Amino acid sequence: MIDSLCDQARKEDITVACLYCDFLAQQEQTVTSMMGAILKQLVGGVDIPIYLREAFQEGKKEIGGRRLSLEDLVGMLRRAIASLGKVFICIDALDEYLPKDLPELLESLRDIVRQSPGTRVFLTGRPHVGGTIQKYFTGAVVIPISPNTDDIRSYLEMKLDRDSEPEAMDSGLRADIVKVILDKMSDMCVRASCLSILSMMYTYENYV
Amino acid sequence: MAHTTNAHSFKFGDGNANCGIITDSFNTHTTVYKSDEHAKIMPWLSPLEPSNRHQGVRTSRFKGVGDWLLETSEFREWRDGAADKAVLFCSGNPGVGKTYLR
């Protein structure tokens, strides 16, 4: 599957923008800074588009350097996406985003998708944000992530292989560790699965 | 994008408490820009540095984990489908893996 995706990425022009929400950074994760961060990633690897250069010069005229409005940013995102191929926008942990700002964030994403229909948005979060997401994207595809025993087992085996004190380990202890963790920590890989996809999407870029 | 950040900032905790350069992705500004102009305009666009965060996720992630998701019809439908399927939402309760793997 990975090979086939990479093959696809080689043929197509794909750009990925990833954002991560964090409880500890809620204050700086405003809707405008989130949209700005998407735009930043889309244009970060190419020459600065003229409209962006002009807006920057314009903003500099004001004390402190006025930043772009949300409306300006959404408009520029449309232009940036139009000049790229397919764009994937990934936002991780929406449940950690400031709840009062979430509707505006989703609304902006909806504007982007409406203006640039080829755009794909990948979101992760705890189930309770699902209702809000579906309010803005009624056709959203939802995949419930449940613990995957194979993922956990292979991760544990890798960690045990790299254990810094192998002399303290024997096969009995090793089996016990795996068993206990599999029994009790079955939620461990919920987010890992999501992150894996984000990383997966990111590999696209390296082939473009 | 993949090359705009400084790899030295992304050593995540591997149990070595003395490594000293474990960074919080939200206050790290070691981004290397494509040009001087990028260096001026990119921070103006947004103070967020998600590329740094992503590098941390990449380096602490374990190969193969979550690959099953790529095989699902939902994922393929989203990736290749029509505009009304533009959004894919992976929903799950947090486990200890969230913090651990980041």
Image: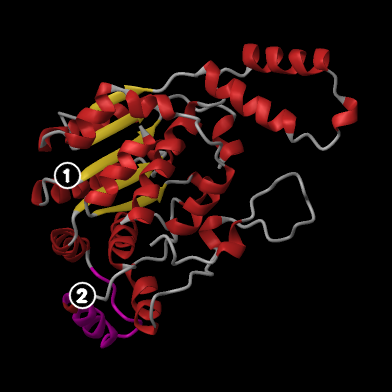
Look at 62% across and 57% down and name the residue there: B23
Which residue is denoted by mark 1 in the rendering? A110
Residue A100 appears in the figure: no
Question: Furthest residue to the right?
Answer: A167
Q: Is residue A71 magenta?
A: no
Same subunit, tags 1 and 2 = yes
Look at 56% across and 36% down and name the residue there: B62
> Image quadrant of residue B71?
top left
Look at 82% across and 12% down and name the residue there: A172
Q: Label 2 is placed on what type of residue?
A: Pro
The quadrant the N terminus of chain B occupies is bottom left
Percent x, y of residue A62? 27, 85
Look at 58% across and 55% down and name the residue there: B24
Q: Is residue B10 above or below residue A167?
A: below
Cα–Cα gap, marks 1 and 2: 23 Å
Between discs 1 and 2, the one toward the N terminus: 2
Residue B20 appears in the figure: yes
Q: Please report, as a chain letter, where disc 2 is located.
A: A
> Image quadrant of residue A128?
top left
B77 relative to B95 in the view: left or right: left
Which residue is denoted by mark 2 in the rendering? A49
**The one of A102 and A114 positioned closer to us in this rendering:** A114
A8 relative to B34 in the view: left or right: left
Q: Label 1 is placed on what type of residue?
A: Arg
Q: Is residue A32 above or below residue A7?
A: below
- Please provide the residue range marked out in magenta: A51-68
Query: SS of the residue at dot 2?
Result: loop
